[in-house]
Image (spheres, rainbow, N blue to C red):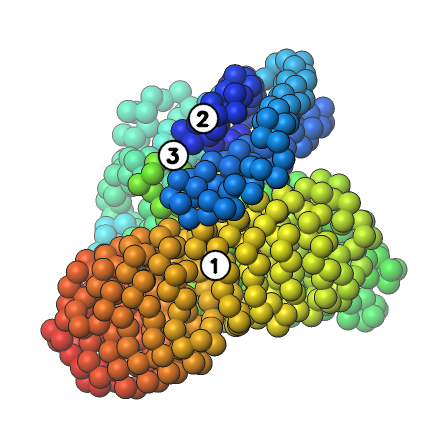
């Protein structure tokens, strides 16, 4: 991951160094010149990173240079964040909120000594960076300012004739043929996209359809074009023309080519397969589409692609989303490649191991083929067990095997997506997750930055996430509304590209890479931090879930550069020294049995953007909690009858407030009216809550309101007329809520117990009328 994302990392550092707040701190400490020199060196290195990123694929020396640079850039980022933290603490001081806390921060040591120490740190890291920057001259890098996808390895040209070893695609073939024969599309030429993961068999399916006797008899002409790397209008037309035996097209100009194409298509119906399309440029597609529309009524085009965005641009009918094979079909594929015909009957013990092996293939036939070919002619049980017990990404891969094929999609990503994708490697396989959870993790790591103050980071993160969905890296989970998942093989790819930076620590983990930055603890581990991990001082992420043993609070201080700290379902008492984790941006202490209070030092964590205290019941809230001036999302539960007014009213940066599992809560607080940037409010499992405060009408930025399982709730608000940003209201199991606020009819989406309000056309209906 490190070698691929440095460009974006450097961009974010330059944004921080250029901020007015940091420049003011530089002036105050007399280190402006040092910061400018640092900025200049980072900028110089940044300009060649895109070229270095490409060269490191084939040049080991460049890869090692990037690894050294990566370590130093992390240190620069930590130092810049330390400056930014001081800027935030000064901001709090200006607002008069934690004068005592800030004074403590500055007077714990001599301010002149502190200033000198920071100046020396800047010089030290800049000199280290300069040393590495000097070495880049040896590689003769080309300066590039614009990010572009890595040039992909040219995929082997596909052809129209299918393999004789196709398994499990008969139903898919019939479904596509029915679309070809009976499509009701009004377009002269219908375009049917087949969408799916790399290696899933889209090309194979298209081959089966192309060669079916019904298709051959239905269409006057058939054409097969492997588009692959470059969606070039001239090349695509040339391939179509050549497919009818016209070999003189190489020397034709584009005008002559398109004239020849119109002659070939005439007004007769044709069938065209555009295989392996990556183009997301609407203009390029429309230029070709206009030429193809001269075909006769009933002409059909099949497009195979990995990207939903490609399908949306090109398709005239809904996409055919190709699913994975069953485990039985996957086993058939594996055995066809692992044995000569009939030999598998002699090795039933290996076939039984094969049944377990195909589970990791996730229904992808190319994965089954890859592992089958790896096992070809091997009849030693040990060889089969080795494949079963190792991750796919740890096994040898040839160019056309599954991971290299999937990595083509990764290489096409812009750099800002690559580290977001690699971060998914911390998840468990098959783990369902909500979109916003990943977005706030990305924000905490600094993966999402914006130079436009009018752009919300959450919105940028959502666009990143949606792009990964469109590229088939993430799919919707069936485990619950709003949840997503990642295919096992895509997860393997995430682990592969994350390399040593992301690590899941299991009971079987024997060593911990010194460059590791992000760790997740497997539930099989039931003791404290492994001793080698305590030597890794620059961790940025710790994810630890239920089932893990108790943590010695002081051990957390080994990791002073943490951005993300997740303790879910643990018995952990938060130490007063947590205030020293000045970089911390995301803190999850959900379902924690040991935390009855948070120390006053918690208020010094001014970088916190996300805090989750779901089902963690504090006996009292720290007075300094309101000092978290950057907190954007708060999830809380309480045993009190009301919310802490002095805390909520000061959290003016909140974008999301989730109040849940609060059995004694009878009222919310009017102080919520001060949180005018709030975009999402969710209240659930609060059985004694009777009404919402009147201040709700002042939440003019509110976009989403959800109220669920509040059985005694009687009123929401008298009017929603002022909530002009409100886009969705969802109410679930609130039986005493009998009427809705005035203005509810202007909200685009209102759901009452799963039924949509807008279908009823009522101006101000009762809730009862919608149940």
Occupied quadrant, residue 499: top right
Q: Which residue position holds label 3?
A: 451
Occupied quadrant, residue 280: top left
Q: Which residue position holds label 2?
A: 23
Q: Percent position (x, y) of residue 26? A: 49, 25
Q: Percent position (x, y) of residue 466? A: 41, 51
Q: Which residue position holds label 1?
A: 623
Inter-mark Cα distance, 3 to 2: 16 Å
436 w.r.t. 745: above or below: above
Locate the C terminus and report the quarter of the image it occupies: bottom left
| 176, 587: nearer the viewer | 587
Visible residue check, residue 208 = no
| 258, 25: nearer the viewer | 25
Name the secondary structure under disc 2: helix
Q: Are marks 1 and 2 in contact (CB under 8 Å)?
A: no
Inter-mark Cα distance, 1 to 3: 33 Å
* Lower sequence index among marks 1 and 2: 2
Q: Percent position (x, y) of residue 734? A: 32, 82
Category of crowding for the residue at label 2, using alpha-carbon neighbours closer than 10 angstroms: few (below 14), some (14–19), many (at least 20): many
Direction from residue 666 to residue 436 in the image, left or right: right
How many circles with numbers are drawn on the protein? 3
């Amino acid at each position: 991951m490190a070698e691929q994302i440095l460009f974006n990392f450097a961009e974010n550092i330059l944004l921080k160094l250029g901020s007015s707040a940091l420049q003011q701190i530089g002036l105050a400490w007399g280190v402006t010149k040092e910061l400018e020199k640092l900025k200049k060196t980072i900028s110089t290195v940044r300009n060649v990173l895109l070229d270095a990123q490409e060269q490191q694929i084939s040049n080991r020396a460049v890869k090692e240079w990037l690894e050294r640079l990566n370590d130093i850039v992390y240190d620069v980022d930590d130092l810049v964040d330390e400056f930014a933290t001081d800027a935030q603490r000064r901001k709090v001081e200006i607002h008069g909120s934690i004068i005592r806390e800030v004074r403590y921060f500055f007077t714990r040591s001599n301010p002149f000594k502190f200033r000198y120490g920071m100046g020396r740190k800047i010089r030290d890291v800049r000199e280290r960076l300069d040393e590495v920057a000097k070495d880049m001259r040896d590689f003769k890098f080309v300066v590039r300012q614009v990010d572009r996808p890595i040039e992909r390895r040219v995929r082997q040209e596909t052809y129209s004739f299918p393999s004789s070893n196709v398994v499990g695609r008969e139903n898919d073939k019939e479904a596509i043929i029915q679309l070809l024969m009976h499509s009701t599309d009004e377009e002269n030429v219908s375009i049917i996209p087949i969408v799916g993961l790399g290696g899933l068999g889209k090309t194979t399916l298209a081959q089966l359809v192309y060669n079916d006797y019904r298709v051959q008899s239905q269409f006057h002409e058939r054409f097969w074009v492997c588009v692959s790397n470059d969606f070039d209008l001239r090349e695509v037309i040339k391939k179509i023309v050549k497919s009818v035996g016209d070999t003189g097209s190489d020397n034709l100009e584009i005008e002559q080519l398109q004239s020849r194409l119109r002659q070939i298509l005439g007004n007769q119906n044709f069938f065209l397969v555009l295989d392996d399309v990556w183009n997301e440029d609407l203009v390029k597609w429309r230029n070709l589409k206009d030429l193809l529309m001269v075909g006769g009524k009933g002409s059909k085009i099949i497009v195979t692609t990995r990207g939903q965005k490609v399908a949306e641009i090109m398709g005239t009918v809904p996409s055919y989303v190709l699913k994975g094979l069953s485990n039985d079909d996957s086993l058939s594929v594996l055995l066809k490649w692992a044995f000569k015909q009939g030999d598998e009957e002699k090795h039933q013990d290996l076939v039984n191991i094969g049944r377990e092996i195909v589970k990791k293939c996730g229904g992808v036939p190319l994965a089954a083929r890859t592992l089958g070919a790896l096992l070809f002619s091997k009849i030693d049980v040990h060889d089969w067990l080795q494949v079963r017990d190792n991750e796919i990404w740890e096994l040898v891969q040839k160019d056309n095997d599954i991971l290299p094929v999937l990595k083509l999609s990764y290489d096409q990503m812009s750099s800002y997506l690559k580290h977001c994708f690699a971060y998914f490697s911390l998840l468990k396989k098959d783990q369902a997750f909500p979109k916003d959870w990943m977005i706030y993790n990305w924000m905490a790591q600094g993966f999402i930055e914006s130079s436009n103050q009018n752009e919300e980071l959450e919105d940028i993160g959502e666009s990143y996430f949606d792009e990964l969905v469109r590229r088939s890296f993430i799919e919707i989970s069936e485990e619950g509304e709003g949840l997503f998942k990642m295919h096992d093989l895509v997860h393997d790819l995430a682990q592969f590209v994350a390399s040593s930076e992301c690590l899941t620590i299991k009971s079987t983990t024997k060593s911990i890479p010194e460059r590791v930055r992000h760790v997740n603890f497997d539930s099989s581990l039931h003791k404290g931090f492994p001793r080698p991990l305590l030597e890794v001082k620059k961790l940025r992420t710790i994810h630890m879930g239920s089932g893990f043993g108790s943590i010695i609070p002081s051990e957390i201080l080994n990791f002073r550069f943490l951005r993300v700290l997740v303790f879910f379902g643990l018995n952990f008492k938060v130490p007063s020294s947590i205030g020293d984790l000045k970089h911390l941006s995301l803190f999850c202490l959900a379902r924690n049995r040991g935390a009855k209070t948070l120390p006053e030092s918690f208020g010094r964590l001014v970088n916190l953007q996300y805090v989750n205290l779901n089902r963690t019941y504090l006996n009292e809230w720290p007075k300094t909690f309101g000092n978290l001036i950057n907190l954007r999302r708060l999830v809380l539960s309480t045993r009190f009858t009301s919310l802490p007014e002095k805390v909520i009213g000061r959290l003016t940066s909140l974008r999301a407030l989730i109040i849940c599992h609060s059995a004694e809560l009878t009222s919310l607080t009017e102080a919520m009216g001060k949180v005018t940037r709030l975009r999402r409010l969710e209240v659930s499992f609060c059985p004694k809550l009777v009404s919402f405060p009147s201040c709700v009408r002042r939440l003019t930025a509110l976009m989403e309101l959800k109220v669920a399982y509040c059985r005694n709730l009687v009123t929401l608000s008298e009017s929603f007329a002022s909530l002009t940003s409100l886009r969705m209201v969802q109410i679930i199991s609130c039986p005493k809520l009998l009427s809705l606020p005035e203005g509810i009819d202007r909200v685009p989406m209102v759901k009452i117990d799963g039924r949509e309000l807008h279908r009823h056309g009522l101006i101000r209906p009762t809730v009862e009328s919608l149940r």
